[in-house]
Amino acid sequence: MSSSHKLVFPGKLPSLNEFISACNKNPKAGGRMKWEDQNRVEWFIRSQLRGVRIKKPVIMVYTWYEPNRKRDLDNISSYGRKVIQDALVHCGVIHNDGWKQILGFSDRFYVDRKEPRVEVVIMEDE
């Protein structure tokens, strides 16, 4: 790997179940939820990764710090990865989130009751 970039934002994103529930109640509510979450993530991308434009394929390492162990791991990360990767594309950090741009990703999970957050390390392939 040649270089890496780190993104950190406080709090947690909704779970996949919360997103599905919003969509089931009203498709517009699900779309609005994703739009709001993606805008929040984009704010942190613009403030922390200002000017970063990655041309090479990347591997992404997600670290999820939850306030407790109530949510299932896949429920935490599924919706969150989608929102984060779409936000990275929208902000121009990566060109796309397809197979050619993202070689893979991994998730790690921890409990931090005082400071729940999401940390993302984007590693450029050589």
Image: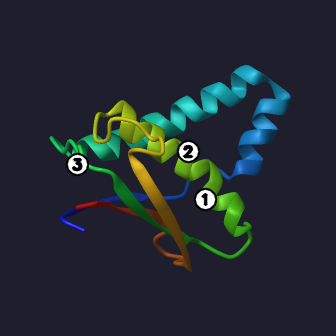
- Which residue bears the numbered disc 2? 82
Q: CA distance from mark 2 to mark 3?
A: 18 Å
Residue occupying image coordinates x 33% and y 35%? 95
Image position, residue 81 (x, y; %):
54, 51
Where is residue 91 shown, x and y percent of the image?
Answer: 31, 34
The chosen color scheme is rainbow
Report the amino acid beneath label 3. Leu
Q: Are marks 2 and 1 in contact (CB under 8 Å)?
A: no
What is the quadrant of residue 20 in the picture? top right
In the drawing, what numbered circle is on residue 102?
Answer: none
Q: Amino acid at mark 1?
A: Ser
| Residue hosting label 3 | 49
Considering only order in the chain, which callout, 1 or 3, is on the residue closer to the N terminus?
3
Element type at marker 3? loop
Q: What is the secondary structure assignment of the residue under circle 2?
A: helix
Query: Label 2 neighbourhood size at 10 Å, few (<14), some (14-19), many (20+)?
Result: some
Left or right relative to 11: residue 3: left
Q: Which residue appears farthest toward the right when viewing the image?
A: 24
Which SS class for mark 1?
Answer: helix
The kind of residue on which mark 2 rests is Lys
Point out the residue furthest to the top here: 28
Instruction: Name the mark nearer the viewer: 2 or 3.
Output: 2
Q: CA distance from mark 3 to mark 1?
A: 21 Å
Task: Estimate the x, y position of residue 34 in percent, counting from the top left.
Answer: 59, 34
The disc at residue 77 is 1
> Which of the two labelled residues, at mark 2 and mark 3, occupies the earlier sequence position?
3
Q: Is residue 6 left or right of residue 97?
A: left
Q: Is residue 24 above or below residue 8?
A: above
From the viewer's perspective, is 68 left or right of 89?
right
Quarter the N terminus occupies: bottom left
When the figure is inspected, residue 38 is found, relative to residue 80, above or below; the finding is above
* Residue sitting at x 42%, y 51%: 102
